[in-house]
């Protein structure tokens, strides 16, 4: 006897989707579920939310993945891969969570079903492409750093101007705290902390007394 799969549907539309609606995505997914004999136990939706946003800002996706972790579903179905995310590493991470929980993925537009041999191969392929993308990004960053070094450009955040350092020092000496000083002078608390550490280091440096060359050291 074939076991009926518990299916969760995920749909998403953003404000930039023209003519796309939640129902437009749900209809073909429900038709697929009826054809394949799924028992649709949950529908998760994010409406008016960009796919570029992370899981923490997409309550529908977050609820879906929590259900996956609890093994409440056997298959997750989405209208298209772009509904799940815009970043390849994020997509691979999501697929990894599904795979770890033994949950299959069905993508309607791409005709991908990871319960099939071809779908299983997709997991490995996406992992390779994600690593390739990370390598490209890493190489670009390193190339940019090397070019900046050759051109003599200073990397990192700009230094504070001397007049700003004097203002921070004066504020701290008047008894104000780091956060109050930062808010008053509109600088980051980290910069104020940096100046305070410099003040403390300078105050701990002992003054050297002049050596009397005529006095015996005995």
Image (cartoon, helix red, strand yellow):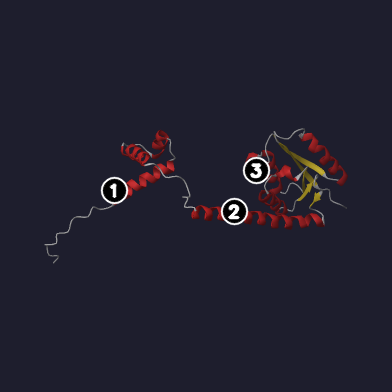
* Residue furthest out toward the front: 151
* Residue furthest out toward the bottom: 218
In the rendered image, residue 114, in percent from the top left (x then y), is placed at 78, 53
Mark 1, mark 3: which one is toward the viewer? 1
Q: Nearer the viewer, residue 116 or 121?
A: 121
Point 53% across, 54% down: residue: 147
* Label 3 Cα crowd, 10 Å radius (few <14 / some 14-19 / many 20+): some
Point 75% across, 33% down: residue: 18
SS for tag 1?
helix
Q: Is residue 115 above or below residue 19?
A: below
- First along the sequence among labels 1 and 3: 3
Q: Contact, CB < 8 Å: mark 1 with mark 3?
A: no
Q: Is residue 216 left or right of residue 105?
A: left
Query: For the residues marked 3 and 2, what is the alpha-carbon distance in whole angstroms?
Result: 27 Å
- First along the sequence among labels 1 and 2: 2
Q: Contact, CB < 8 Å: mark 3 with mark 2?
A: no
In the rendered image, residue 86, in percent from the top left (x then y), is placed at 69, 45
**Residue occupied by mark 1:** 203
* Label 2 Cα crowd, 10 Å radius (few <14 / some 14-19 / many 20+): few
**Residue occupied by mark 3:** 55
- First along the sequence among labels 3 and 2: 3
* Label 1 Cα crowd, 10 Å radius (few <14 / some 14-19 / many 20+): few
Q: Is residue 217 above or below residue 93?
A: below
Query: For the residues marked 1 and 2, what is the alpha-carbon distance in whole angstroms?
Result: 44 Å
SS for tag 2?
helix
In the rendered image, residue 15, in percent from the top left (x then y), is placed at 69, 33
In the rendered image, residue 71, in percent from the top left (x then y), is placed at 72, 49
Point 78% across, 56% down: residue: 120
**Residue occupied by mark 2:** 140
């Amino acid at each position: 006897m074939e076991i009926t799969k518990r299916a969760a549907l995920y749909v998403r539309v953003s404000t930039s989707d023209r003519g796309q609606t939640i129902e437009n995505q749900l209809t073909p997914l429900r038709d697929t579920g009826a054809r394949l004999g799924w028992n649709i136990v949950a529908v998760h939706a994010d409406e008016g939310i960009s796919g570029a946003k992370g899981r923490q800002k997409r309550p529908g996706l977050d609820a879906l993945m929590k259900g996956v972790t609890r093994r409440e579903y056997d298959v997750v179905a989405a209208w298209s891969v772009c509904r799940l995310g815009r970043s390849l590493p994020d997509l691979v991470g999501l697929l990894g969570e599904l795979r770890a929980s033994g949950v299959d993925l069905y993508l309607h537009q791409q005709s991908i079903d990871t319960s099939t041999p071809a779908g299983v191969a997709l997991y490995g392929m996406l992992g390779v492409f994600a690593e390739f993308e990370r390598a490209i990004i890493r190489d670009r960053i390193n190339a940019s750093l090397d070019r900046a070094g050759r051109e003599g450009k200073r990397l990192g955040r700009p230094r504070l101007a001397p007049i700003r350092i004097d203002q921070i020092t004066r504020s701290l000496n008047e008894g104000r705290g780091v956060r109050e000083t930062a808010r008053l002078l509109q600088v980051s608390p980290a910069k104020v902390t940096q100046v305070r550490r410099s003040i403390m280091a300078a105050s701990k440096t002992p003054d050297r007394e002049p050596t009397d060359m005529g006095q015996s050291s005995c």
